[in-house]
Amino acid sequence: MSNIVLDTIHERRAIRSFSPEMPPREDVERVVDAGLWAASGMGKQSPIVVAITERGLRDRIAAMNAAIMGAPEGMDPFYGAPVILAVLARRDVSTHVCDGSLAIGNMMLAATSLGLGSIWIHRAKEEFDSDEGKAVLADLGVEGDYEGVGHCALGFTAGTVPAGAERKPSRVFWAE
């Protein structure tokens, strides 16, 4: 029996090549909304999403991320994705990293369901803990003590969607 949610989970892939074409704003909003509906510890809804579609800021964040990872000059850690959804969460909430992770997972599944590609990119913590990252947040009107959890790079897939890897065995232990 087919199930749209389970089918989407099985279809989702990490995309490492994006078209420069910007997805429709409505689709980006739907992906963000999926993140905002993610489960969160005690329902505190600690994550926020910084939806970056402006090319200059997108490239600035990419350069920060590349520098943190020690990548060569000009390397794009977001694989050319035109949209970067940076997820941060309130540090004073004990489940903030888990909450932000669930938000990113929801957004990646929503992207797949809408025919978009996505990939989780790390180093948001280091980016937004830096003076430059804090300045970006301040310029956007973000107030509060937030920790970067990760990024959902988003866009149309360039080329073919990769095949899924076989699942490793012996990863479930039943206590019946």
Image (tube, rainbow, N blue to C red):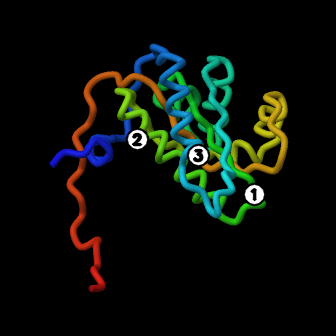
Which residue was labeled with disc 3? 150
Judged from this view, the residue extending furthest toward the top is 21
Q: Quadrant of residue 55?
A: top right
Could you say where residue 116 lies in the image, as x and y percent from the top left? 39, 27
What secondary structure is marked by label 3?
strand
Disc 3 versus disc 2: distance between alpha carbons? 15 Å
Q: Which residue is drawn at 27% across and 32% down?
A: 161
Residue 171 seen in render = yes
Asked if the residue under mark 3 is in contact with the one under mark 1, i.e. CB atoms within 8 Å, the reply is no
Disc 2 versus disc 1: distance between alpha carbons? 25 Å
Q: With respect to residue 166, does 18 lie above or below?
A: above
Which residue was labeled with disc 2? 109
Query: Position of 11 compared to 97: left or right?
Result: left
Nearer to us of marks 3 and 2 is 2
Give neighbour class at mark 3: few <14, some 14-19, many 20+ (Cα, 10 Å): many
Q: Earlier in the sequence, mark 1 or mark 3?
A: 1
What secondary structure is marked by label 1?
loop
Residue in the foreground of this view, choosing between 106 and 54? 106
| Amino acid at circle 3 | Gly
Which residue was labeled with disc 1? 91
Q: Quadrant of residue 14?
A: top left
Residue in the foreground of this view, choosing between 39 and 13? 39
Residue in the foreground of this view, choosing between 54 and 16? 54
Query: Position of 59 compared to 92: left or right?
Result: left
Q: With respect to residue 48, does 117 lie above or below?
A: above
Disc 1 versus disc 3: distance between alpha carbons? 14 Å
Q: Residue at x 49, y 16 (%)?
A: 24
Q: Residue at x 52, y 42 (%)?
A: 121
Could you say where residue 163 lies in the image, as x and y percent from the top left? 22, 40
Give neighbour class at mark 2: few <14, some 14-19, many 20+ (Cα, 10 Å): many
Q: Which of marks 3 and 2 is nearer the N terminus?
A: 2
